Image (cartoon, helix red, strand yellow):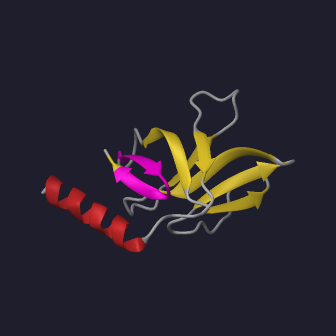
Amino acid sequence: MKLLKRFWRGLCEWASGPRKLLRVDGDALPAAMPPRDLVLLCEGGEAWSVGMTCPCGCGQLIELPLIPQASPRWRLQVDEAERPTLTPSVWLRTGCRSHFFVRAGKVLWV
């Protein structure tokens, strides 16, 4: 059953195209998060956090710090087509316990 679920997630991700990055000025994620895209929070011209809803469909809000002082912290790279890449992987320790990479706007399940 797990294999079938993993295959279905991969197929849906492939068919729906890459996720984009939306930039927002402020110190909090928007109340209505986009269902697929990532939201980059900037304040004073500095990017400090990225947020998204969990790609498994559970609806959990994920917020990842980007600032060097945070631990753990993630790095965000954006290509010319506005496709985001996050490093390291995202691993939710509670809730749905999803574990995935975001590479060039695509979710790659672990």
Counting from the top left corner in percent of width and height, residue 58 is at 39, 60
Q: Quadrant of the N terminus?
A: bottom left
Q: Is residue 53 visible?
A: yes
Q: Is residue 98 magenta?
A: yes
Question: At x 49% / y 55%, what residue is drawn?
Answer: 104
Q: Quadrant of the C terminus?
A: top left
Q: Viewed as shown, does residue 48 lie left or right of 78?
A: right
Which quadrant would residue 83 be assigned to in this image? bottom right
Question: At x 51% / y 69%, what residue is drawn?
Answer: 35
Counting from the top left corner in percent of width and height, residue 98 is at 36, 48
Q: Is residue 104 magenta?
A: yes
Between 85 and 60, the one nearer to me in the picture? 85
Counting from the top left corner in percent of width and height, residue 45 is at 84, 48
Q: Viewed as shown, does residue 12 lie left or right of 92?
A: left
Which quadrant would residue 92 be assigned to in this image? top left
The residue sitting at the bottom extreme is: 15
Question: At x 77% / y 51%, what residue is drawn?
Answer: 42
The residue sitting at the left extreme is: 1
Q: Is residue 28 visible?
A: no
Between 53 and 107, the one nearer to me in the picture? 107
Q: Is residue 72 above or below residue 14?
A: above
Which quadrant would residue 97 be assigned to in this image? top left
Magenta part of the chain: 97-108
Most frequent secondary structure within the magenta stretch: strand
The residue sitting at the right extreme is: 44
Counting from the top left corner in percent of width and height, residue 69 is at 70, 27
Question: At x 69% / y 29%, what residue is drawn?
Answer: 68
Q: Is residue 46 above or below residue 3?
A: above
Q: Is residue 18 above or below residue 85?
A: below
